[in-house]
Image (spheres, grey):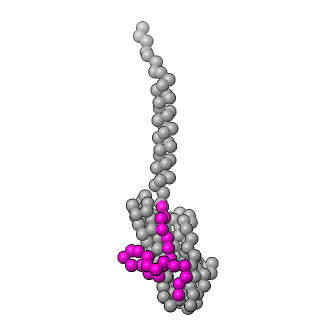
Amino acid sequence: MKTIPRKSGWTFVVAAVFLFMWSAWSRDLSAADELKLVRAVMCETIQEYAPVFPAVVFSIERGRVSCFTEFDLVPEKTYIHHKWYRRDNLVTVKRLTINPPRWSSFTSVQLRDADKGPWRVEITDGNDNLMRTLRFSITD
């Protein structure tokens, strides 16, 4: 009769440690692969894909104000939203496509005399999770 050698308990221990490390490593990767907003500013205009004259108070005479957002990690093609509010009333929602690996985007609104007062832009991801809020005012 032939005896079959038994595998040691070390095989199980090595496999368990490997699975634990793989699980932890894959969790770190998924956390690192999240969409990352690195810069968001309100500005007077955009030139050569960059914000010009960032501020928090804008004159109505400018006629327009822009919201600029920059993402340094875009793991996959996705969408963001710029939600423009005037005096806590939603004025417009702009849906923007962003692509890997880095992406900048902006939206603008045309200003009218009735637009004076407090504003905010809420920047949300494709699942409507708030990423940042920018507050600014329009004055004379």
Q: Nearer the viewer, residue 58 or 93?
A: 58
For image coordinates 56% across by 85% down, the residue present is: 138
Drawn side of residue 121 relative to residue 103, left or right: right
Whether residue 97 is visible: no
Drawn side of residue 118 relative to residue 13, left or right: right
Examine the structure image and report whether residue 47 is included in the region drawn in magenta.
yes
Examine the structure image and report whether residue 41 is included in the region drawn in magenta.
yes
Q: Nearer the viewer, residue 41 or 9?
A: 41
- Quick one: quadrant of the C terminus? bottom right
For image coordinates 53% across by 89% down, the residue present is: 60
Whether residue 23 is visible: yes
For image coordinates 51% across by 38% down, the residue present is: 20
- Quick one: quadrant of the N terminus? top left
Q: Nearer the viewer, residue 107 or 90?
A: 107
Q: Residue furthest right?
A: 88
Q: Which residues are magenta?
A: 36-59
For image coordinates 55% across by 82% down, the residue present is: 57
Rendering coords of residue 135 (x, y %) = 57, 76
Compared with 10, 110 (above or below) is below
Rendering coords of residue 105 (x, y %) = 43, 72
